[in-house]
Image (tube, grey):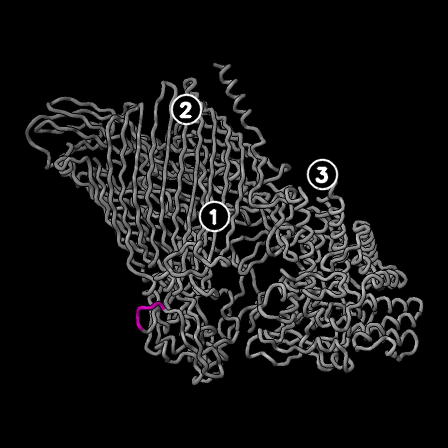
Amino acid sequence: MTKTAKTRFFLTLLSVLTALFPPGLSAQRGYTVNGTVRDTEGESLIGVFVSVKGTKTGTTTDLDGRYAITLQAPATLVFQYMGMENQEIKVDKARTLDVTMKGDNTLDEVVISAGYGLAQKRSDMTGSAFQVASEQLKTLPASRVDNLLQGMVPGLAIEESTNSAARTRYTIRVRGDASLNANSEPLWIVDGVPVYTGGNTGSVNGTQYSVSPMSFINPDDIESITVLKDAATTSIYGADGANGVILVTTKQGRGDGRLHVTASMKYGISRVDKSTLIKLLNAEQWWGLAKESWVNAGYDLAFFPYQDNYLNAYSTTDTNWYDVYLGTGSTSEVSVRIDSGSDKAKHYLSLNYFGDDMVKKGNTQRRFTLRDRSQFQLARRLSLDLNLAASYNINDITSISDSYYRVIPIFSPYDLDGVTPRLYNYYSESTDSYSPTLRKFVYSAVPNRDLSDNTQRGTTLDGNATLTWTLLDGLKLTSMLGVNALNVMELIYNPKTTLDGKTSYEQDGGSRRAGVFDYTWNNIDRLNFDRKFGRHKVGALMGIEFVSSENRSLYATGYGFANDHIKEISYAISESTRGSSSASNSHSLSYLGTLSYSYDNRYYLSASYRRQGNSAFSTYARWGDFSSVGLSWNVHNEPWFHVGAIDRLKIKASYGNSGNSRVDTGAAYGTYTYGSGNYYGGLMGATQGNAPNPGLSWENTYIGNIGLDIGLLGNRIDIQMEFYRKYTKNLLYKGRVSSIISDGTVMRNVGEIENQGFEISLNTKNIVTPRFTWTTDFNGAVNRNIIRKLYKGTHTGFFDYVWMENASKDAWWLSRWAGVDPSTGGPMWYDVDGNATFTFSYDNRVLLPEYSKEPDFRGGMRNIFSFDNFSLVAFLTYTIGGWELLDYGQDGYDVLSNNTVVEDLDHWREPGDVSNNPKPIYKVTTGSRRSSTRFLYSKTCFQLKNLVLSYNVPKSFCQKVKIQAATVSLIGDNVFIWSPDASRDRNSYKTLRYPGGLTRTASAQLTLNF
Amino acid sequence: MKKLIATLMTVLSLTGCTSFLNVETLGKSTISGFFADIDGLKAAGLGLHRLITEFYDDNYLRMGDLAGDEVILYRVNASQALQLIYDFESTAADNSGYPYLIWKRGYEICTNANNILYYGEQLLGSYPEEEALIRKHFGYAYFARALAHFDLLNVYAMPYDYTPDASHPGVVAIDYVPGFDSELPRNSVRDCYKMIIEDLGKAIDCFGTETERTPTYISGLACKALLARVYLYMKDYTQAAAYAKEVMDQVPLTPRTDYVNMFRRAQDFPGEGILRMNAYDSGAGMRSLCSPLSGQECGPDEAFLARFQAGDIRQELFTYVGEAEDGVEYEGKVYTAICKYLPYKSGVSTAENRRSDPFVLRVSEMYLIHAEALCLGGGDTKGAAEDLKALQARALGKSPSEISLVYTGSDGLDRLIQEERVKELCFEGHRFFDLKRRHEDVVRSASTTSTMKRLKYPDYRYVLPISQMEMQANDKMIQNENYE
């Protein structure tokens, strides 16, 4: 940085600081300390803030870098300067104190872990990796790990699946979707061991209800999470790196010879954010619309199905089903971390309890985790690292499914006695007479919630042992053995008092017991070399990795129990019992290597290679080769580079490939299926399941990445920008072949898809003063995909989207809504030629590139304000653009059995009415609710995800109560969500996006360090 | 130190043995593992029979009758797929209806048959003592492949004599295990028939001299019966008559007393079946189609019922009387329905007594083939009339000598034979294909609910289109005329 630039900048700053710290505060008597402040190159620094520690006394250096300060007693002087490390020097008498300040490289000093013992400073990187530190995670909701990263990493998209599973599922995509039919989830690796994250849908295979294994990890144990995105960082992960790799590194002991104990408690209250609930009809509105639809269909109101009777008081019932299903939840968390040991033996132990009584009544999560990490320096050149973690999880589940919005308000959750969960309603289903009968109330989740058991007990055990032998300085031989085991027991019992428990057997009650057992182990043996020779730095890695994974599940069901207390299958009527088991497994073997070279911290070159074989592919196509090269140039380290405001300028580029092999293990070999569907004459027969595809092989993704890394104004502004293009070939594609070869779809390598995008991450220190700082971390990303090639150029149409060459897979494929015919109140669409038509046809679907599921831009922003002992963190996520298809309405068609959205009230009534909602007619199919552009909603929204106010208890107080430090925090999660088209009394993306609403939590946290 | 590193590297590379990747796949039966022993072969044989059962219990039989002239379709209950067949309105774009389903199911049989022949071959070497059993399974496979091709030809190709040399497009004759990139063009009808006859010949060899016959399994006799039908379709009357006679000599007609039970108590009265699929484990395709108690989709046409003389036992197969097990509201009520697939319920309904086993081949058909072949082949009207009398005598409860047939010339007798064919084989999947092979029009009665009252041979709709899905997935496929 040139002197003139600095001068200009700091003179401005000076005026701010001077205003904050008027010189009048300086003491008048005592002794004076003066001197000059210079940087490491001997240049004097202007505007260095010199203050007396613990007081508000201070001054700044002048244009020659000189300062003078008068003191009254022995004191500690603090020298602060942007982009430089603070220095503290004790003084007790008058003296000349010249100070040399060193550059503050805290940003650069963050060491980014890339696995396999590869760790680099950001300034040394050639590839794209984004690291999130524990500091950023500690106040986020602790229920699951994957959701933590939402909005935090540019290019990492986390979306809640809209389906109504008992537990929310997330789809996680790193730089878009690079597959059509293979699993597109990123690869998760915890301390070097790949973690089973469930199948394609992120759910555990084998249980009836899904609880994600990502909820079994204690976020408090995480030191950092690194997301690897480009070829230079992912190709070393070979087979499954193409969708990005997420590395979780857990905490370890400091080994500073002292005992550190950290205890923390957190308690929170949660309620649903009512502004995010679908706006539905209340009883009065429903009666009006239902009767109108009934009459419009030409039926007599005398035969209206719902009339008060011995079982139902329809006319006086007005149930808000949200109130029935949602209540006040609470979360509590207690954790203790003990960190001890010396440099010979470091130890880290953590115990954690997390409990969540969710706002969805009948859903709870309890998690107990233990992590123990011990590191021993066995001999001068030999060390051992043992890492063991166990987690025990109890989840009570009530699946509410679509009952939130589906059940009509005139049904009540309980019988007329007000306490017995209602199983039946009494109403008519005829249109030409009132002939009521008893009907099962299958859409009420209340009986199952109040009376049934639905529990999952999940245990995970992951551990690894690493032995490192330093052969020479810089040359290490490391061998690691890691294990990840998951075991889930699912226990469901539906008593006789529920519909699910009523069976055809004489005695009722139904029980299901299921077990899931997933094991993964891996072994990595590697040689790492890192050496500096003058200005040359050389690194190399050679290794071999074995991975074995095995997934097994089994279940038993039985019906007919003597009473509802003995729930085990052995007590069920024996002929009702059924059981089954299933298994799948695969092995992979890899040889890997990397080379890196750098010259004078200016030029960097890296290369990596991995050859991987996977048993899921047959011998013809078993092996895949993945490689990459990366280059970077630290322009700012060039002697000739003198650009005033720019402290850091780094240009990097990488290119290479990685793969995806996550397909069904039977796809390559072909299978025969035994099953009752193949029996003949009561004997067990079999027919071909999958046709064999011996050529089936890896998906291959080529990723090009260009990045620009800029530090401005003493690194107060830090910008990282990346452009990438991902091109996937040999897509694993489930497509049709001739029925002569195989019926149905087969997995084969056809097709190509391209993703390209831009990511930006911007970190700024907006205001930095000794007492007040404000920093902002902002990130954003855009991704676009285009299918470049498909099998024989054919397109595959789905309900509302289509895979077509040269089109985005994210574009909607819908009939275009043309509104309501003002003369008849009937629906209209445009046909493919753009002419209005009165009949719905799927043949009129057109591809709508302007309506894409993928947002134009998305990301997050974190603002941190700190003032003295207070800090305020506001974390905001945003989505701009993108469209979602959301429909919970009826247009009168099914309004007698399903509740509907309030928009249905704004319907066409008489000729001449201009309305977007057709005339409601009961059970007359007009197709108006078929998927069309009528139901597209803009995804633009801004969400204040996390708001934290913390107070660090002053040291002086801490010392009195004999603790080292204490922090009190008030935390809000999902504080606020805003979307531009939201309105008070009608639905929008905000209300339709989450059928059960967003949970808002307010918590208080106390952390104590001993 | 260098030495040490070198040693370490050697150890590392040795441990990386690629045998680590040779994993026995858990929880799935890979094809090669499946066919590694006799048990797999046996299961594949059973599976093959099951596929034929499904094909006959559903689409293939329905097609043969719905496109004919003896059925009334009840449109309220009937699925759209059935209506399209009934109205001759199938299109290639109909990817969920019959054009797709029959093709798919027919070739599913071929795929499984070809797997048995291809992967089973190695078993001969490893299990020489089981040769007879292995060969029997090859016999199943050859027969199944022939049957599937023959049925596919009936649906997707014009009859054998549509062109003088049968060079018009048939179906894809598939006698090998194709790869994903195999080219699969249509073969001519002539080539397809050639393969069918060869396959049946090979099958007969595979069954050898085995004479034990279980009608629910493919047998050497079934091969001969099918050959009789194939030759009849080719209008090779000499061969047709010879094969039909061979079968007739071995298996007697079911007597009149057992006739209705043969259909409605399949488990106890296998009857004259030569190949009759065991529907014990299957769904109830034909049963649900015909049952008057739950959404009856089709029934006999009135004009068709009028063709029966008084006292014809076969009439009994068109009156359904609700049984106690049907429930109080049905008990004793009388319905007009096709009862060939409606088993009597005796006591508690079980998988065994619910069976509605569809016939693939039975002896009565051999009598009709024999009669037609004699009549049209050499003009042996006397011989033909004997066959006809045997069937009529059974139906009417008389002796053949009491039957007098009134006709002039072989044409006149041929008409009587066809009339008898309609009455005997109705709703067993023959009618439309009979009309087609004989170049006759489909003429519906006045009571038909179809929009198609008369289809004139050789209208393009005598064949179904190749479904769009097949057209898209198979470069070499050629669409049937007028369906483009």
Identify which amino acid the numbered label 3 is placed on. Answer: Ser
Kindly report the distance in space between the C-alpha atoms of the residues bearing marks 2 and 1.
Answer: 41 Å
Q: Name the front one of labels 2 and 3.
A: 3
Give the CA distance from mark 2 to mark 3.
51 Å
Does the magenta run of residues contain A901?
Answer: no
The vertical placement of B265 against A515, above or below, is: below
**Range of residues picked out in magenta:** A417-421
Rendered residue at 24%/37% (across/down): A262
Asked if marks 2 and 3 fall on the same chain, the answer is no
- Does mark 1 fall on the same chain as mark 3? no
Towards the viewer: A308 or A999: A308
Tag 1: residue type? Asn
Kind of element beneath mark 1: strand
Q: Measured along the vertical axis of the image, is residue A304 above or below residue A579?
A: below
- Label located before the other in sequence (2 or 1): 2
The residue that disc 2 covers is A468
**Badge 2, how many Cα within 10 Å: few under 14, some, many 20+?**
many
If the image is split into quadrants, where does the C terminus of chain B sit? bottom right
